[in-house]
Amino acid sequence: WLAHCDTACLTSTPPNITTDQYALLALKTHITHAPDDLLANNWSTAASVCSWIGVTCSSRHKRVIVLNISGMGLTGSIPPELGNLSFLLQLDTSTNNFNGNMPQELGYLRRLRFMSFSNNSFSGELPSQLGLLPKLQYLLLANNSFTGTIPPSLCNISKLETLDVQFNLLQGRIPEGIGNLENLKILEMQENQL
């Protein structure tokens, strides 16, 4: 087989679930409380990540495309390793008790279309790297304690349809470029200091 393999064959990499597993295990270690040890019992290296609760994989490559851990009663923080889930389309951590900063490494999730961190206890500034997500359509960050300004880089997300940052501690001016987002249908910014 190798005798017939051309350069393209040598440079392609096989589907690699271990990258995704590493990222999810990093998240698991950053979760300090889960009701009934939900993730401790389910997120086990003995099983494929594709069978883990809250995880959906693509049928073709067996890579993680959805991480939906919303409403699971989880407490903890989001590790930078989550930015290594390079096939991720949807990330939903809403309605838990996550805290700390949003890692700038989430800007590596170039396929991401949906991100919800709403209804948690996140704090710190919104990373400007969120503006590097070209396919993002829904950015839901309401009901947290985010501070600082709305990054002007968000105006680079041309596919953005919904931006919800209401009920935070954001301040300063609303970036002018927000008005140039042609696909933006819903913009929620109330209950900040803008």
Image (cartoon, rainbow, N blue to C red):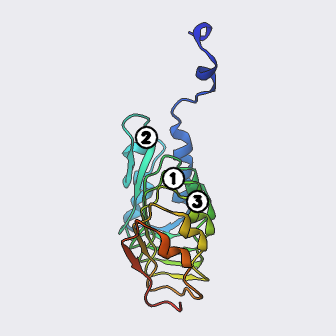
Q: CA gap, disc 1 to disc 3?
A: 22 Å
N-terminal of the two: label 1 or label 3? 1
User: What residue appears at the point 49 percent right and 89 percent down from the top-left corner?
Assistant: 192
Name the secondary structure under disc 2. loop
Specify the amino acid type for callout 3: Leu
Q: CA gap, disc 2 to disc 3?
A: 30 Å
Q: Residues within 10 Å of mark 3 (few under 14, many from 20)?
A: some
User: Can see residue 33?
Assistant: yes
Specify the amino acid type for callout 2: Ser
Which label belongs to residue 48?
Answer: 2
User: Can see residue 98?
Assistant: no
The spot of residue 181 in percent (x, y) is: 47, 69
Name the secondary structure under disc 3. helix
Please tell me which residue lies in front, 165 or 15: 165
* Number of on-image labels: 3
Q: Residues within 10 Å of mark 1 (few under 14, many from 20)?
A: many
